[in-house]
Image: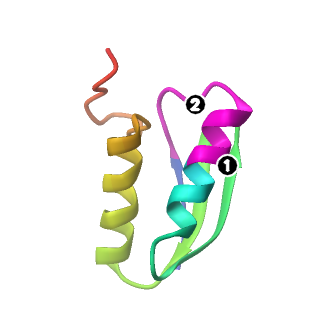
Amino acid sequence: MRKTVHIQNLICDSCAKTITSRLIELQHISDVNVDLEKKTVSFNFFTKHDFERAKHILEMLGYPILGHDNILN
């Protein structure tokens, strides 16, 4: 499955590189694409659990999905 999510705090290329490098380390996550202009992250995953792990990593890195608590505010 493929999912695109809008995230918070995405402002620069360094942010995009951090997100990409951390997500591709996860098993069953692939083809990570970060769009700075749209403030989105897209990736392939196999199960809902894989998606939840990716979402958790994004939150821990400081890039929560839009609408979720923003720990940087």
The residue that appears at 31% across and 54% down in the rendered structure is 56
Could you say which quadrant of the image residue 51 lies in? bottom left
In the orientation shown, which residue stands out farthest toward the top?
73
Residue 21 visible somewhere in the drawing: yes
* Crowdedness near tag 1: few (<14), some (14–19) or many (≥20) residues, C-alpha within 10 Å: many
Examine the rendered structure and indicate whether residue 32 appears above or below residue 41: below
Query: Front-most of 24 and 3?
Result: 24
The residue that appears at 49% across and 38% down in the rendered structure is 7
Could you say which quadrant of the image residue 65 lies in? top left
Circle 2 is placed at which residue position?
Answer: 10
**Residue stretch rendered in magenta on the structure:** 6-18
> Where residue 48 appears, x then y in whole percent?
32, 76
Examine the rendered structure and indicate whether residue 52 appears above or below residue 50: above
The residue that appears at 28% across and 26% down in the rendered structure is 71
> Is the residue under label 1 in contact with that under label 2 (CB below 8 Å)?
yes
* Secondary structure type for disc 1: strand
- 43 is within the stretch colored magenta: no
Could you say which quadrant of the image residue 36 lies in? top right
- Of pointers 2 and 1, the one earlier in the residue sequence: 2
Q: Quadrant of the C terminus?
A: top left
> Where residue 25 appears, x then y in whole percent?
51, 69
Q: Is residue 22 left or right of residue 16?
A: left
Disc sitting over residue 58 in the figure: none
* Secondary structure type for disc 2: loop
- 15 is within the stretch colored magenta: yes
Tag 2: amino acid: Leu
Query: Front-most of 22 and 47?
Result: 22
Disc sitting over residue 34 in the figure: 1
* Crowdedness near tag 2: few (<14), some (14–19) or many (≥20) residues, C-alpha within 10 Å: many
Tag 1: amino acid: Val
> Where residue 52 appears, x then y in whole percent?
31, 65
